[in-house]
Image (spheres, helix red, strand yellow):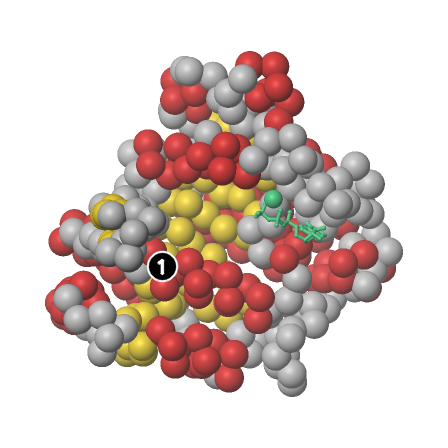
Amino acid sequence: MSKKQYRIAVIPGDGIGKEVMPEGQRVLEAAAKKHGVSLHFDHFDFSSWDYYEKHGQMMPDDWKDKIGKHDAIYFGAVGWPAKIPDHVSLWGSLIKFRREFDQYVNLRPVRLMPGVPSPLAGRKPGDIDFWVVRENTEGEYSSVGGRMFPDTDREFVTQQTVMTRTGVDRILKFAFELAQSRPKKHLTSATKSNGISITMPYWDERVEAMAKTFPGVRWDKYHIDILTANFVLHPDWFDVVVGSNLFGDILSDLGPACTGTIGIAPSGNINPEGNFPSVFEPVHGSAPDIAGQGIANPIGMIWSGAMMLEHLGEKDAGQSIVEAIERTLAERTLRTKDLGGNADTTACGKAVADMVD
Ligand code: ATP
Ligand code: MG
């Protein structure tokens, strides 16, 4: 249900995160104005190298009190590898959000946009348009396991996949609901039940059970190996693709890669019930190699803002941003350098904001 008034926690982070964030806000403001939505932005300087340098940690101890009541978190990019190891910056911020705010869905669109060359030959905008839904809290990325007899011939290492009924069912429900909301109403499940003989058959069983409660959704499943091949060979087959933590991780990088540059890909780490804020951030990192030059592509940040509005229930406002992005990308002079254009970050952001209607 849309409530028209939202408080957004804005965390620009590091590197180009600081440069693309103002463009994301500019476009969000334009869309909000056109669609009668009110957005209030609160800025936070933590989750950045600067903050870490001053305070010796990525975030203040009371970070949850500071951002836990916001309707959503709009996040730039974290990490500055020359100064701070990636695992420190990541585990000190984004991973804390995911865990403490129970963001059990990782969502990424795979959509070929005009003006963006796809590495898949002969594909045109409209040919590729689907979502990857990744389970974000359990599965293969559990810490259950261990190492025995290290540095001996008997060395033994094991790590277990953990699937819970609650964890599997809730991600499947989200994916089926998403499929049901789309014109094609088609869901594809990633499995490997021919090789992984306990957890993956369980996953398949739960897909089948969930499918019964969504009679309007057509569904199928593929083993992950052939599924990755089909992403490349037949991306037009897909509408919503759901996978466990590991399979979803692979697919959610492969999918956007099939549709071109990293500079435009958005993502959401979502708590669908809205018990906690969800995080919306571009797929790219802080890009130290181009930071400070004003040439970063702001579209990934802007598109993440569109996803945020849709998550908040403001579908029309979100959609108006996606359409504005399409119109901007179609015009070479409005694109940034990574897409063969000559616009800088601000010019591209302004162009998208002007196109919003
Ligand atoms: P991560 O921080 O996720 O580990 P990374 O640091 O390896 O990723 P990125 O920061 O995403 O990688 O940068 C990878 C490459 O893509 C760099 O060469 C960077 O300049 C380029 N790149 C990333 N984002 C953008 C953007 N928005 N516009 C233009 N180029 C970008
Ligand atoms: Mg990085």
Q: In the picture, which quadrant includes the N terminus?
A: top left
The image shows residue 105 at horizontal and vertical percentages of 35, 50
Is 289 rendered above or below residue 240?
above
Camera-side residue: 289 or 44? 289
Dot 1: what SS?
A: helix
Q: Is mark 1 within 8 Å of ligand 1?
A: no
Ligand 2 is found in which quarter of the picture? top right
Rendered residue at 80%/41% (across/down):
294
Residue furthest out toward the front: 153
Camera-side residue: 107 or 27? 107
Camera-side residue: 342 or 246? 246
Apparent side of residue 65 relative to residue 54 in the rendered image (left or right): left
Apparent side of residue 326 relative to residue 87 in the rendered image (left or right): right
The image shows residue 316 at horizontal and vertical percentages of 50, 52
Amino acid type of the residue tagged 1 in the rendering = Leu
Rendered residue at 30%/60% (across/down):
244
Rendered residue at 64%/35% (across/down):
80
Q: Which residue is mark 1?
A: 246
Categorize mark 1 by other alpha carbons within 10 Å: few (<14), some (14-19), many (20+): some
Rendered residue at 25%/48% (across/down):
149
**Is residue 25 at all visible to an observer of this figure?**
no
